[in-house]
Amino acid sequence: QVQLVESGGGLVQAGGSLRLSCAASGRTFSSYAMGWFRQAPGKEREFVARITWSGGNTNYADSVKGRFTISRDNAKNTVYLQMNSLKREDTAVYYCAADYGSSWGSWGQGTQVTVSS
């Protein structure tokens, strides 16, 4: 398994951009599909985006499609989430996780994203 640490969150105005990073430790990072999730106050954690081990395929929640881009650099053991045209409803704690097939796991501690109007 891998250990994950997210970074890059912060306070941004609506319409702005942020890039989140998720650094992985462990030699098997490139073996796994990776994903980003988020949890807003009072809400359940929800899926945001997923990328296959090679980076060749991605999929997104409808709410972020066209605004967010997930990518990865296996040489750096890092997965990214580029977030553009941010909206207030994007405010949440963002988590990355590894897709172990039967379940998502190795959740990081999360990084807070706050979008102000």
Image: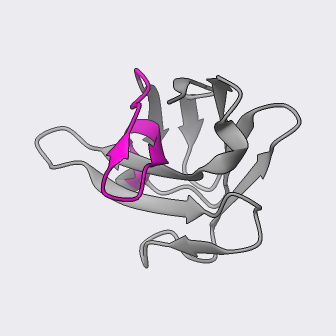
Q: x%, y% of residue 45? A: 24, 48
Answer with the quarter of the image where residue 79 lies.
Answer: top right
The single residue placed furthest to the left in the displayed view is 42
Residue at the image position 39 percent from the left and 43 percent from the top: 91
Residue at the image position 51 percent from the left and 72 percent from the top: 60
Residue at the image position 64 percent from the left and 64 percent from the top: 52
Q: Is residue 31 above or below residue 29?
A: below
Q: Is residue 11 above or below residue 54?
A: above
Q: Is residue 113 above or below residue 6?
A: below
Q: x%, y% of residue 15? A: 62, 56
Residue 93 colored in magenta in the image: yes
Q: Which residue is nearer to you in this view: 20 or 97? A: 97
Q: Is residue 74 left or right of residue 84?
A: right
Q: Is residue 5 above or below residue 93?
A: above
Q: Which residue is nearer to you in this view: 74 or 38? A: 74
Q: x%, y% of residue 32? A: 59, 50
The single residue placed furthest to the right in the displayed view is 75
Q: Can the viewer see residue 117 in this picture? A: no
Q: Is residue 114 left or right of residue 52?
A: left
Q: Can the viewer see residue 37 in this picture? A: yes
Q: How is the rendered protein coloured?
A: one colour
Q: Which residue is nearer to you in this view: 26 or 63? A: 26
Answer with the quarter of the image where residue 86 lies.
Answer: bottom right
Q: Which residue range is magenta in the image?
A: 90-109
Marks counted in the figure total 0
Residue at the image position 40 percent from the left and 20 percent from the top: 109
Q: x%, y% of residue 96? A: 49, 39
Q: Is residue 55 left or right of residue 64?
A: right
Q: Which residue is nearer to you in this view: 114 or 47? A: 47
